[in-house]
């Protein structure tokens, strides 16, 4: 049985940032340790999604022996002001030290499960509440485990609901920012279903 509780953390400008944290009676695997061989094969992060400050990435590691840690990621992307963690793990990493001004925000979703309409609204609010002060260069990093499906669905939902894009336009923008884009067809179909639009054949992965 899943539950949700709302936590708040201060963003880089001192404003509160909402943080959804879901908990389960079962023990969750540490983020990077789950399917670590596959994690190493995945590109660390993509590029900012066109028209937004959203930067898709895979989950970060707390192990300094790994290449994709908080330290390395934020050094390579110094304009990131917040990280939204959508993964189903609670002990992935910490954002501290010289990066303590970067807001670490949590909305936890089970792998392969489509976020509800309410959770999409929560994600949009979380992004809007933590927009970078530097609107030209500031970035918000977003990740699940690998940075494709949960991440892609929520970013595409943001593109559709906030920017008014069609599902095919949103999916294409995410695909270009984080190749090859959303991988699971049920996520893609739901983006179209929620807008009463037929799925484009080019986006069917079956």
Image (spheres, rainbow, N blue to C red):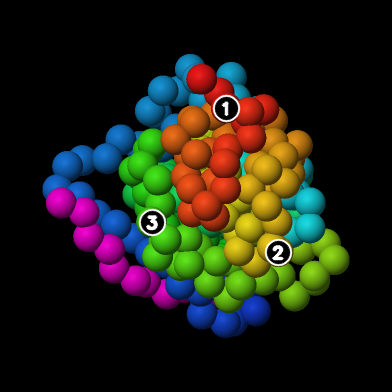
Q: Quadrant of residue 148?
A: top right
Q: Residues within 10 Å of mark 3 (few under 14, many from 20)?
A: few
Q: Residue at x 55, y 66 (%)?
A: 124
Instruction: Measure the alpha-carbon separation of dots 1 and 2.
Output: 23 Å
Evaluate whether residue 15 shows in this view: yes
Between 90 and 51, which is closer to the camera in this rendering? Answer: 51
Q: Is residue 6 above or below residue 57?
A: below
Query: Can residue 38 be found in the magenta stretch?
Result: no
Evaluate whether residue 144 shows in this view: no
Q: Give the number of the mark in front: 1 or 2.
A: 1
Between 53 and 93, which is closer to the camera in this rendering? Answer: 53
Sequence-wise first label, 1 or 2: 2
Q: Is residue 169 above or below residue 64?
A: below
Please tell me the numbered disc located at residue 163: 2
Q: Which residues are magenta?
A: 1-10
SS at mark 3 in the image: loop
Q: Residue at x 46, y 72 (%)?
A: 18
Q: Residue at x 22, y 60 (%)?
A: 3
Between 181 and 37, which is closer to the camera in this rendering? Answer: 181
Please tell me the numbered disc located at residue 204: 1
SS at mark 2 in the image: loop
SS at mark 1 in the image: loop
Please tell me the numbered disc located at residue 116: 3
Sequence-wise first label, 2 or 3: 3
Q: Residue at x 79, y 51 (%)?
A: 50
Instruction: Measure the alpha-carbon separation of dots 2 and 3.
Output: 19 Å
Q: Quadrant of residue 201?
A: top right
């Amino acid at each position: 049985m899943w539950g949700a509780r709302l936590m708040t953390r201060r963003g880089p400008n001192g404003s509160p940032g909402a943080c959804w944290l879901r908990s389960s009676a079962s023990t969750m695997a540490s983020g990077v340790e789950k399917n670590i061989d596959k994690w190493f094969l995945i590109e660390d992060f993509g590029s900012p999604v066109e028209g937004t400050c959203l930067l898709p990435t895979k989950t970060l590691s707390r192990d300094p022996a790994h290449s994709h840690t908080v330290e390395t990621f934020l050094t390579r992307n110094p304009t990131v002001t917040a990280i939204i963690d959508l993964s189903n793990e609670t002990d992935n990493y910490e954002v501290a030290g010289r990066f303590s001004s970067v807001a670490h925000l949590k909305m936890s979703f089970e792998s392969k499960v489509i976020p509800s309409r309410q959770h999409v609204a929560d994600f949009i609010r979380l992004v809007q509440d933590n927009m970078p002060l530097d609107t030209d260069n500031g970035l918000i990093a977003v990740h699940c485990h690998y940075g494709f499906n949960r991440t892609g669905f929520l970013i595409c939902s943001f593109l559709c609901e906030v920017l008014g894009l069609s599902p095919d336009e949103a999916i294409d923008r995410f695909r270009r920012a984080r190749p090859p884009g959303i991988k699971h067809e049920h996520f893609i179909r739901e983006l179209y279903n929620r807008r009463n639009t037929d799925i484009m054949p080019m986006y069917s992965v079956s």
